Image (cartoon, grey):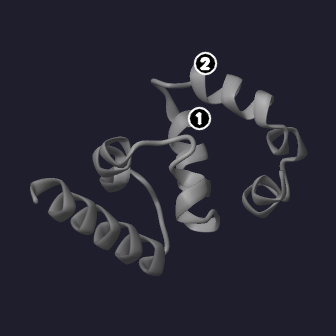
Amino acid sequence: MDYLNAVFWDYPRFTDEKCLKKYIKQNKCNDGYKWVLGRFLEHGRVVDTFKYFSISEIADLLPLLKLSDYSLKKWKRMIQVYNEIKRK
């Protein structure tokens, strides 16, 4: 998966979708989960991020992640837009 190469260029094992899904599932309640989410938020496309994480998960964990100012602003806006759409 090319989009996984863009997110995990330096972690080849995570470019295998089955391996990544297994890792996410096994680490749901710890820092590994937040690390993977952070990688997607920094380096992944929105559409690819949503293959693994819901907007509510992103909104809940966003304050706990160390992101660049650009990524933080982008995802705060994304959450705001999705919430506005939900309300309609």
Q: Crowding near pointer 2: few (<14 within 10 Å), some, many (20+)? A: few
Q: Position of residue 58 (x, y in %)?
A: 38, 49
What residue does disc 1 label?
Answer: 32
Return the mark for residue 22.
Answer: none
What residue does disc 2 label?
Answer: 26
| Residue drawn at (18%, 54%) of the image | 86
| Residue drawn at (58%, 22%) of the image | 25
Alpha carbons under labels 1 and 2: distance apart? 9 Å
In the figure, 70 relative to 49: above or below?
Answer: below
Amino acid type at circle 1 is Gly
Seen from the viewer's position, the closer of residues 26 and 65 is 26
Specify the quadrant that holds the C terminus: bottom left
Q: Depth-wise, is mark 1 or mark 2 nearer the camera?
A: 2
In the figure, 82 relative to 25: above or below?
Answer: below
| Residue drawn at (48%, 66%) of the image | 67
Q: Is residue 54 left or right of residue 51?
A: left
| Residue drawn at (43%, 54%) of the image | 65
Seen from the viewer's position, the closer of residues 78 and 36 is 78
Q: Position of residue 23 (x, y in %)?
A: 68, 27
In the figure, 71 relative to 84: above or below?
Answer: below
Which residue in the rendered view is the most extreme toward the bottom? 70
Q: Position of residue 13 (x, y in %)?
A: 87, 38
Location of residue 29 (image quadrant) = top left
Amino acid type at circle 2 is Gln
Q: Is residue 16 left or right of residue 76?
A: right
Location of residue 15 (image quadrant) = top right
Identify the mark nearer the N-term, 1 or 2: 2
Secondary structure beneath dot 1 equals: helix
How many numbered marks appear? 2
The answer to whether marks 1 and 2 mark residues whose Cβ atoms lie closer than 8 Å is: yes
Seen from the viewer's position, the closer of residues 88 and 19 is 88
Q: Position of residue 87 (x, y in %)?
A: 10, 56
